[in-house]
Image (spheres, rainbow, N blue to C red):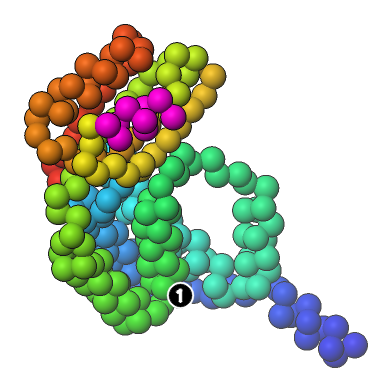
Amino acid sequence: MNKIQTFQEFLTTQSVQIPVAVFIVNLLLAAILASILGKIYVRYGDSLSNRKQFSKNFILMTMITMLIISIVKSSLALSLGLVGALSIVRFRAAIKEPEELMYLFFSIAVGLGLGADQTTVTVTAFIIICLIIIAKRKFWQKDDENENLILTITGKSNKIKLEDIVGLLKEYCTGLNVKRFDENDELIESAFQVEFSDFEKLSEMKNRLKTLDNSVMISFVDQKGIY
């Protein structure tokens, strides 16, 4: 009987008062760290999507995660209820690149740490990881400095194929790397990291692409200039 009673007490939600001052400090710290993380993502990220727009999600993600953990950390029952609630929620965010998912996990991890009152460990880990990201971009990827031109090609899927695009690009590019490929019933969109020996090659390639599909849309972006 005592064991059953003890187990019931263990599952019972305990009314634990969270110090308001500490909670506010951690909440503000979460916003500051998430803001710094957003700036690092915009400055040092490699994603082809709109990094500035995507980084705006980090602050709310981190603060909301911290709020949830602060509430449920004192009760096993609330923790189990959170798992059950999340199991019926399906997130369908359009995450197309692994880097975007990595930064989302990073912001969630910061919220988890601050919500669990592990402020020192969280801030220390945040600083170390951010320094590694910056160092990796500045020193370990110098060989990629000349590979910043991103070519995006969009056309009708019934008129142009990826094999045709790649075959044509190989004739004119000195360097070619597929970065993204999306296709549906109507459109095909592909992004490539390319290198050209001279401007004439780029111009000739553009004209050849128009022969595959006159309605094809072509854009060139210097990756360093995205942010």
Rendered position, 112 above or below 168:
below
- Spot the residue most to the top: 214
Q: What percent of the width, then of the height, locates residue 37? A: 26, 60
Rendered position, 124 above or below 66:
below
Residue 189 highlighted magenta (yes or no): no
Q: Which residue, given by chain and number where applicable, does mark 1 sit on?
A: 116
Q: Nearer the viewer, residue 137 or 93?
A: 137
- Spot the residue most to the left: 199
State which quarter of the image contains the N terminus: bottom right
Q: Nearer the viewer, residue 60 or 97?
A: 97
Q: What percent of the width, then of the height, locates residue 141? A: 21, 62
Would residue 112 be seen by someone viewing this image from the given angle?
Answer: yes
Taking the spot 29% from the left edge, 19% from the top edge, the residue there is 209
Taking the spot 84% from the left edge, 88% from the top edge, the residue there is 3
Chief SS of the magenta region: helix
Q: What percent of the width, then of the height, locates residue 96? A: 43, 43
Count the labels in the image. Answer: 1
Q: What's under tag 1, amino acid-wise? A: Ala
Where residue 202 sits, quadrant-wise, is: top left
Q: What percent of the width, then of the height, locates residue 182? A: 45, 32
Mark 1 neighbour density, 10 Å: few (under 14) some (14–19) many (20 or more):
some
State which quarter of the image contains the C terminus: top left
Asked whether, in this view, residue 79 is left or right of residue 206, the answer is right
Per the image, label 1 sits on a secondary structure element best described as loop
- Spot the residue most to the right: 1
Where residue 173 sits, quadrant-wise, is: top left
Q: Nearer the viewer, residue 97 or 7?
A: 97
Residue 169 highlighted magenta (yes or no): yes
- What range is drawn magenta here? 163-171
Taking the spot 14% from the left edge, 54% from the top edge, the residue there is 145
